[in-house]
Amino acid sequence: QKEVEQNSGPLSVPEGAIASLNCTYSDRGSQSFFWYRQYSGKSPELIMSIYSNGDKEDGRFTAQLNKASQYVSLLIRDSQPSDSATYLCAVRVNRDDKIIFGKGTRLHILP
Amino acid sequence: NAGVMQNPRHLVRRRGQEARLRCSPMKGHSHVYWYRQLPEEGLKFMVYLQKENIIDESGMPKERFSAEFPKEGPSILRIQQVVRGDSAAYFCASSPPGGRVNEKLFFGSGTQLSVL
């Protein structure tokens, strides 16, 4: 059974601090990794994608991938109250192309 | 609006009725995914389709649920004889053609199904 695991939270972070969100996956052959943000009552929106080991930065967001440890993370620098949302980790399964999501981590930025 | 269009936004059905959920992908996208989301839960994969072809339906219950994506028109997720446990938000997402490993999903606004 292919799985994507996340801590459900809530994760509370003071405004201006770094928020760190973590995700592990079970299928060692996975090749594509995504972070989606979902506000309450809204649909998910893609914020980061990463395909190679290491770090990928986009503005205040940094995605980190470690395929040997089957671990992907998202760092949010200078956290803002508008970052308060649920963050979903998603993994593209190599062989059959479906994309599997974790249950998400609720992030709360404290003003 | 060039985004993924889902309708209806809200659908109320009584137990035993049929529910039909529609999804029109983004222009140029030929792949459609359906996911179900319960409150405080993540997105559960149901089915992955391209035009006139089901690629993967491993997440869809064998009974009462079906999906199609015809050559013309939207993708349809059909739930027959609904039960209260079918109440959930159903999201559709689309991606460009090609099946490349770097595809990303674009989501519609979802259909909230409520079974009375």
Image (cartoon, coloured by chain):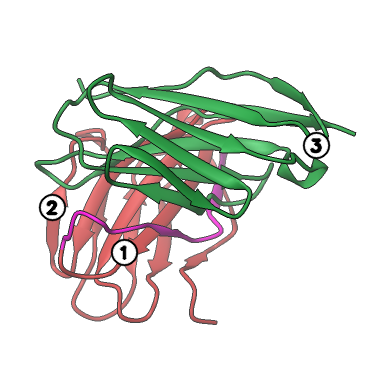
Q: Which residue is mark 1?
A: B95
Tag 2 subunit: B
Residue in front for this viewpoint, B36 or A65: A65
The Cα atoms of the two marked residues, 3 and 1, are separated by: 35 Å
- Of badges 3 and 1, nearer the viewer stands 3
Q: Residues within 10 Å of mark 3 (few under 14, many from 20)?
A: some
**Residue at figure coordinates x 50%, y 61% from the top left:** B108
* Location of residue B84 in the rendering, given as x and y in whole percent from the top left corner: 51, 29
Q: Which residue is mark 3?
A: A16
Span of residues in magenta: B99-116
- Is residue A50 visible in the rendered image? The answer is yes
Q: Residues within 10 Å of mark 2 (few under 14, many from 20)?
A: some
Tag 1 subunit: B
Name the amino acid, label 2.
Ile
- Of badges 2 and 1, nearer the viewer stands 1
Find the residue positioned furthest to the front: A54
Question: Mark 2–mark 1 contact, CB under 8 Å?
Answer: no
**Residue at figure coordinates x 17%, y 26% from the top left:** A28
